[in-house]
Image (cartoon, helix red, strand yellow):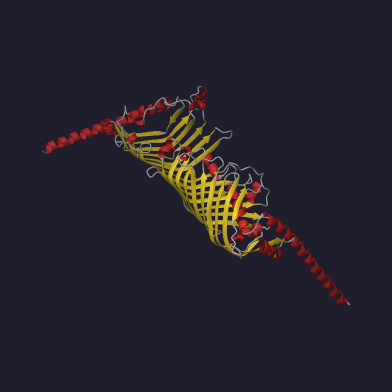
Amino acid sequence: MKLVLKWIIGILLTLILIVVASLWYLGNHWRPLLNEKIHAIALSSSDSLYRVSYDDLDFNMVTGNAYLYNFKLIPDTNVYKELIMQKKAPDNVYEVSVARLAIRNFHPKRIYTERKLNIDEIIIENPDIKIVNQTHAYNDTIQSKDKRTLYQKISKILNELTVEHIAFENVNIAYTNRNEKKEKTTRLKNVNINIKDLRVDSTSREDSLRFYNARSVDFTMNDYRIATGDSLYYIDLKEIQFTSADRSMVLNGLQMMPRYNKVDFYKKTKIAQERFELAFDTIRIHHIDLFKLLKQQKLYAGEVVLGKSRVEIYQNTAYPKKKAEAKIGKYPHQEFRKLAFPIKVDTLTLNELMITYLEYNQKSNQIGKVSFNNTQGTFHNVTNDSSALVNNPYMTADIHSKFMNNGKLHINFGFNMLDKLGTFTYKGSLTAMNAKALNPLTKPLAMVEVSSGYFDRLHFNVKADEYKAVGRVDFFYRNLAVQIIVKESNGAKQKNGMVSILTNKFLINDSNPDANEKFHPGPIHYKRPLTASFFNFLWKSLFEGVKASVGIDKKRETKLTVAAEEADKAVGKVKKFFKGIFRKKEGKEQDSLRR
């Protein structure tokens, strides 16, 4: 029995030694054959455009592992020029270098017995990819000769190809666009891509849960920065994550910040243009339609959620204004409609958005402030895709905010995305606001201080287009009173009592309904200046209705302006008279003291 066992063990060991020796022989003698084959494939598949090089190829048939070191894919510029002359050159030229490529456990036995290549893991370390894009018109008319699927291309050699995990670690990508007069390069650094359960067989293409034959593709990138074309801002992105299995994308720490502080910014621009600061903690995109994204180059998503965000706009009016340009066709929804990249988002949600507008007024030497605190809202049917707009041409928005961190603002927008005049509607209300909360705005910019008042509710309903706004304001308020601030010749600012009295007595109604219980509506018939921006148009059209509600019309305003100027002159004469008397009195007292 022992002798038989020895024979069995001896035979088994002999067979193992023969297999190991054979695999060792193949592993060592296949290397030059593989080297030759790799170079031949690179040349034949690219019309001799590319050549490959690497320092070492470690191929072990026993362990089922393979390692490639310092691999390079190098384009031949002379061949590329010849291909251009022959109208055969591709639009993109690649240059690739990989520090190390590791293939772990590719199960050699299955290749021989079942014609299956099953790989546990592929790791590509520190790939550096350079892409140069130069579009050639002839490529638009050339159709691919080979329309076979990936499986059909490998089916003569393999019945199945699977990879459990593919990792691209620390990828650097440089994309150069040579289609413009000035060459532009975009760089992506610190990119990591993980592909799980890649499968190519007779059925994988029909699996709707797969993304390019993979069960999931995860993409992450950290610390991305790009400068804007005007060299005034940096756009920074702390992290981006994409997961094909969840069909979602998350952007963390996205912001656009000026490269200069407020003082240096205007020294650089030398004009009174707006300075922006934008910061978004998180932007989450859910339920992305991957088919439309990859096959039709359209971004369709079920929901986009903006986390805590901040928008600050600052303007220094001490600098000269840039030449005004007509803004016809430039409403935000019209500009969105013009984007070349089709987008459709079913629901866009705003959470905790802070909007602040700051403006420096040279006359008051102060900065006025308008704020919309804790803004929350929902946009529906956010799309510029014509095929989607045929079914529903309206984009809507429902927004809540605390105006000046005091009054409760609720506003609904409706945008007709197909209307050539950019028609839109807005209606809503402002309730429960202390009128003195307006002082950070009115004192620096209008030199008017609200001394008392309470806004019970302000309702508005307006329809507008590129040229006009028509609607109505119903403004219910009480005990409104203001103080007019004037600037003296020495630069000092003080309240003008006479003009304030005239304003409160004759210009504005202190309450609405007034003392006679008459309610004053605020009709809106406002013609848009062609250079006015969208938000300027909103504010000015609403303000026309508010002025009518508080009792100000153009005729009354003109009369009061004249009266105020005459009163101011009269006050000035009285002041001079009393000053003259006091000067004379002081002179007589000094003469008597000398005597």
Depth check, front residue: 421 or 108:
421
Does residue 275 appear anywhere in the picture? no
Task: Give the total of numbered labels.
Answer: 0
Q: Quadrant of residue 496?
A: bottom right
The residue drawn where x is 74% and y is 62% is: 567
Residue 460 placed where, x, y %? 55, 54
Q: Residue furthest right?
A: 595
Quarter containing the C terminus: bottom right
The residue drawn where x is 24% and y is 33% is: 17
Residue 283 placed where, x, y %? 46, 49
Does residue 50 appear anywhere in the picture? yes
Residue 104's place in the image compared with 510, above or below, is: above
Depth check, front residue: 455 or 523:
523
Task: From the viewer's perspective, tell me whether residue 408 is left or right of residue 244.
Answer: right
Task: From the viewer's perspective, tell me whether residue 140 is left or right of residue 367.
Answer: left
Residue 71 placed where, x, y %? 43, 34
Residue 578's place in the image compared with 460, above or below, is: below
